[in-house]
Image (cartoon, rainbow, N blue to C red):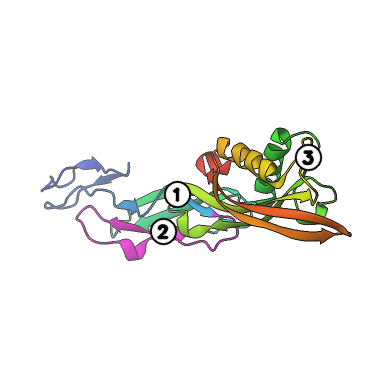
Amino acid sequence: MAYGPILDQTTWQDVAGSTWTAEGNGLIVWGLPTINLVGDNPQTMTQDAPYVEAGATAVDVNGTDLTGDIVTDSSAVNVSVPGDYLVTYDVTDSQGYTDHQERTVRVLDVDRPDVRTRLAALLAAGMPDGVQVYDYPTEQQKVPAVVIGAMDWEPAVMGSLKAINWTVQVTILVQRSKPAYNVYTLETLSVKAAQLMSEAGMRVTGFTNEATQDVGGTPLLSGSLEVVYRVHTDDAFKF
């Protein structure tokens, strides 16, 4: 970038690529304004959460603040559909020179049934023969059974959405009877389920003491494991 007097009637090309002829001494060759994005790029957010614009700042070549002149277009962002969306930022200085910047807004898929299905598949593949695994409590028909119950995610621990913690209740159901050598007990099935989930990187944070239930006239014993399942959001929330 060159500053200072230039000769009258000489031809110049400015930084924007425009050619012009000087008319009088004391002119300067102007530089482009600069936009600086605030926050992360890409910016991540969860599906159906409200979009919050992270913002940007801008100055011209002399350091004059142009932040208030930035035109931001975030109309392409669709918070209802997971994917990557483009937000654009444009600014024009007093000489008509412009800068253009872009930010990717990544809407992350937090589809709960997918988490539930993957957890059910993990348990079904590792539990002993004859133990039923059900995705939802309403599907439970036979015992012994492992049932995936209440599930919730914790936004308070998400930080920058690098990971999301899911809290899952996993219930073990067995028919109430005297222990026998060939009968699974509440304790043995609970330990097995806890082992499978721990090996998969989940945290078992508690166990609810057994309780008696009566389902369809059959007396059952039940116990519930409280599990924390951490899902990393790298690569657009692919598990």
Q: Nearer the viewer, residue 36 or 113?
A: 113
Q: Determine the residue positioned at 11% across, 53% down.
A: 26
Q: Nearer the viewer, residue 77 or 209?
A: 209
Q: Which residue is mark 2?
A: 54
Q: Dot 3: few (<14), some (14–19), or many (≥20) neighbours within 10 Å? A: few
**Residue assigned mark 3:** 180
Label pair 1/2, CB-CB below 8 angstroms = yes
Mark 3 or mark 1, which is nearer the start of the sequence? 1
Q: CA distance from mark 1 to mark 3?
A: 63 Å
Amino acid at dot 2: Ala
Q: Which residue is mark 1?
A: 103
> Which residue sits at x=35%, y=63%?
69
Q: Nearer the viewer, residue 211 or 85?
A: 211
Q: Tell me if 191 is positioned left or right of 22 in this view.
A: right
Type of amino acid at the residue the image marks with label 3: Ala
Q: Answer whether residue 169 is visible to the viewer in this image.
A: no
Q: Quadrant of residue 179?
A: top right
Mark 3 vs mark 2: give the one in front.
Answer: 3
